[in-house]
Image: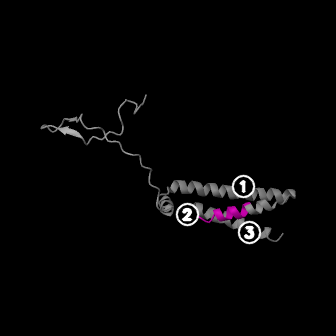
Amino acid sequence: MRIYAPNGTNLGSPAGNARRTSSSGFALPDAASAPETRAPTAPKAAANIDALLALQGIEEDPAERRKRSVQRGKGALDVLDDLKIGLLSGNFDASTVNRLRHAAANLKSTSGDPGLDAVLAEIELRVEVELAKAGQY
């Protein structure tokens, strides 16, 4: 048993072979012609992924960009706290320095909010100072 669609009709039947009458609103399908079937075609792939990424950057919501910037700032502060705890306990870990480098790289982008950007610049400065101190060990 073959099921074509939820209502039992054939989804691929074209409407182009309808018989026209003199009135303009009603047409009967031609019973003599068989319905044409079309081969399914695959969706076309994007030609250039860079163009799609550029469009995503253009259409970025300012609230979403601000939210991501706040998350990056909080993450950098968390890594600074981990560094402080590690130094106070005497367990200086090299992986914390790597996390600091990663946090510093993430703080380079702007949020669009001047106040938030100023706070993030101060956090970035503190991270850079701690990275310079860690280089002396």
Q: Which residue type does callout 2 highlight? A: Pro
Camera-side residue: 8 or 1?
A: 1
Q: Nearer the viewer, mark 2 or mark 1?
A: 1
Precedes in sequence: disc 1 or disc 3: 1
Magenta segment boundaries in residue numbering: 99-112
Q: How many marks?
A: 3
Q: Residue furthest right?
A: 90
Q: Are marks 1 and 3 in contact (CB under 8 Å)?
A: no
Q: In the image, what residue occupies the spot 60% across and 58% down?
A: 69
Residue 78 location, x and y as percent? 72, 55
Q: Secondary structure at mark 2?
A: helix
Camera-side residue: 72 or 126?
A: 72
Q: Which residue type does callout 1 highlight? A: Asp
Q: Is residue 105 magenta?
A: yes
The CA distance from mark 1 to mark 3 is: 16 Å
Quarter of image, res 14: top left
Q: Secondary structure at mark 3?
A: helix
| Quarter of the picture holding the C terminus | bottom right
Q: Secondary structure at mark 1?
A: helix
Quarter of image, res 97: bottom right
The CA distance from mark 2 to mark 3 is: 23 Å
Residue identifier under label 1: 78
Residue identifier under label 3: 129
